[in-house]
Amino acid sequence: MPKGKRKPELLFQGADWDFDTLRRTYDAMEQIAREDLDLDFYRNQIEIISSEQMLDAYSSVGMPLMYRHWSFGKHFIHHERLYRKGAQGLAYEIVINSNPCISYCMEENTMPLQALVIAHAAFGHNHFFKNNHLFRQWTDPDGFLEYLNYAKAYIQRCEERHGAVEVERLLDSAHALMPSSVFRHRRPPAPSEREARARERLRLEEEERSVNYLWDAMPGSRRPAPDGSDLRERLRSMRLPEENLLYFIENHSPTLKPWQRQVLRIVRNISQYFYPQKQTQVMNEGCACFVHWEMLNRLHERGRIDDGAMIEVLHHHTNVITQPDFDDRRFGGINPYALGFAMMQDIKRICVDPTEEDRAWFPEIAGKGDWRGVLKDAWANYRDESFIQQYLSPKVMRDFRLFACADEAAEPWVTVSGIHDERGYLDVREALARSRDIAVREPDIQIVDVDLLGDRVLRLKHFERDGIPLERAPREATLAHLRHLWGHGVALEETR
């Protein structure tokens, strides 16, 4: 340190913390976020909660305001028992994609851990939520907390008026269909309390008009057109095929009451909230890990946190980004934290200190030095599979010891199709990107036809991928829930 220059004051010492310490540390990290990393984020709301409150947030899918359902209590008991026995830890934080961005930190955290999770959630995740194109397209952070508050109150009123058992049965069926109840190819209307109340009034009017279905379905009231135009008109009027199951049932079920339709809308809006998160887990967690790594290292380099605090930060950071080997009992596939962080660290290396291999693979960014711009562009414009296709380097593939396999059902063996050579790197990258594609991981089930003036059987089609059919037991259980909501017969066809 130059003579006469004052030594920087430590933000904290030891494990203890108070709210003044949190504020002082937050302000220092905010300065780094804006001036050093050039991050753009929503204003933050940081809340300190107990371990029991964290368990409660676990059980209700991380939502700060959530309606009641028996499955949330089941999850709470499950996680609480494992936690008390020491068989499972708790998340260091939970962050909500809202404006303001809400970060929940446990009161049991030490001060170095509080600094890490605030950097991770309040700046890393926050920047990603605000800037990634999927979150900007599919979610409404300004109105989501208001909508959750409305949804919780609405379902509570339904329980009071119609009975908890009937509401619970409706939610059971709606929850079973949540994975197949999102808009994937067009923007949904943003949910809000005012818009929800307006739709309630429209549903009452629609319920009155639906009586015409019964009259039109009387014998002799209608004859099908011989040229098939009746079918084409039916499909056109109902915008079939439709991949959002709850949306179609909500709008066309002949048996649901207005309040039941509104409950279905609440469930599918919550499902839509999680849709971008399912497509960006590697990128989202990688961004948050990269940001907290950069921030805490800068604080340490500037003398704002001491060696003891940094050692604890490194311990927790290493736990998060550890990638267990395939024969380790902890192995559960590729750790998205590990892969995302490794790729973003690698992008910085390629921009600053590239090898000849890097220059051949990434000529646009190698040696250019602008790693902040490259990362911000990736965080804004990519999702997991496209990010992997664009930026997964041979170095990261070697570090993770990745290779590709071809597993054909008709063959008695598995073939290694991609190794560490020029062709193999491309195959490995393509295989890993495909494994992160939500269109591949989730079944493609669409409503293709229903004759509301005839037998009212809801006809669905499952388009198999790679010749893989739906599992029989879950398929039949889900179809039972679908019949309950539709009120009439349901037929599912599987096709390749």
Image: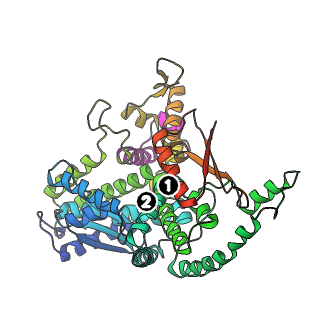
The residue segment tinted magenta is 338-364
Q: Is residue 458 above or below residue 16?
A: above
Q: Which residue is disc 2 drawn over? A: 172
Q: Amino acid at mark 2?
A: Asp
Rendered-image quadrant of the C terminus: top right
Left or right of residue 481: residue 233: right
| Residue 205 magenta | no
Question: Which comes sooner in the sequence, label 2 or label 1?
Answer: 2
Q: Is residue 350 magenta?
A: yes
Q: Residue 347's x, y, as percent?
A: 44, 46
Per the image, the residue denoted by label 1 is 481
Q: Nearer the viewer, residue 418 or 376?
A: 418
Q: Are marks 2 and 1 in contact (CB under 8 Å)?
A: yes
User: Does residue 405 show up?
Assistant: yes
| Residue 323 x/y as whole percent | 31, 39
The residue located at (12%, 65%) in the rendering is 13
Give the dominant element type of the magenta stretch: helix, strand or loop. helix
Q: Is residue 6 left or right of residue 424?
A: left
Outermost residue toward the front in this view: 219
Residue 386 percent across, percent down from the top left? 54, 46
Left or right of residue 221, residue 291 in this image: left
Q: Residue 434: image x %, image y %?
A: 53, 39
**The N terminus, quarter of image:** bottom left
In the depicted view, which residue is nearer to us: 314 or 185?
Answer: 185
Residue closest to the far right:
227
Q: Is residue 367 visible?
A: no
Q: Residue at x 28, y 42 (%)?
A: 322
